Image: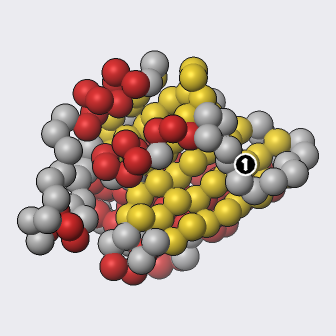
Amino acid sequence: MNINVLIVGVGGQGTLLASRILGKIAENDGSDCKLSEVHGMAQRGGSVVTHVKAAEKVLSPIISEGDADVVLAFEQLEALRYINYLKRDGTVIVNSQKILPMPVITGAEFYPENVTDVLKKECRFVIEVPALEIAESAGNAKTVNTVMLGVLAKTVGLPYEEVKKAVIETVPEKVRNVNLEAFEKGYNFK
């Protein structure tokens, strides 16, 4: 496995679990993998960024600007914030969900219009995913992360069975089946 994935979202969306599943895939594959997590008031809906680097040998856990193969965005505004990390020929996979930050809720700022259109102007490859709707159809709105992981796996060619195995090994048993369902729905998206 040789990939740099920047996972971005807000607190509570499961970005950290998604990064751990990717780490487990790399570990099972025999690849070196480094994860680095940045939390900005994550428990209050703040930005959460996770760097996932997997290769034969990884020296640093941090993805430099312009070096991410994929920006996996669990929320639209977060995709826009971190697009500068994407390689020129990289892919943005963005959840169509909008989660309003506190300055927007209080009226101090406005949520940008047409985020996906802006992303499409800036990036060669953009995949918009209605991940919240897909997660709800799987049985739990909190499985947006495994829906997005399924879309990522299909997009970059990670073997279905290997990702499924990593989900089983990483996700707590009480929510494992619904996460497997969400992963499958994400993998089969489009």
Nearer to me, 46 or 150: 46
Is the C terminus in the top left, top right, bottom left or bottom right quadrant?
top left
Relative horizontal placement of residue 100, taking residue 169 as reference (left or right): left
Q: Residue at x 77, y 37 (%)?
A: 2
* Image quarter of residue 17: bottom right
**Residue 143: x and y, percent?**
38, 61
In the picture as drawn, the residue positioned furthest to the left comes out as: 107
Q: Is residue 132 left or right of residue 122?
A: left
The answer to whether residue 75 is seen in the rendering is: yes
Q: Position of residue 188 (x, y in %)?
A: 42, 35
Q: Secondary structure at mark 1?
A: strand
Image coords of residue 42 (percent x, y): 42, 75
- Residue neighbourhood size for the residue with mark 1, other residues' Cα within 10 Å, grouped as few (<14), some (14–19), many (≥20): many
49 sits left or right of 123 in the view: right
Query: x%, y% of residue 146?
Result: 46, 55
State the residue at coordinates (90%, 46%).
57
Q: Is residue 165 visible?
A: no
Q: Which residue is mark 1?
A: 53
Tag 1: amino acid: Lys
Q: Is residue 25 above or below residue 48?
A: above
103 over 156 or under it: above or below:
below
Question: Which of 30 and 39 lies nearest the eye of the viewer?
Answer: 39
* Closer to us: 117 or 72: 117
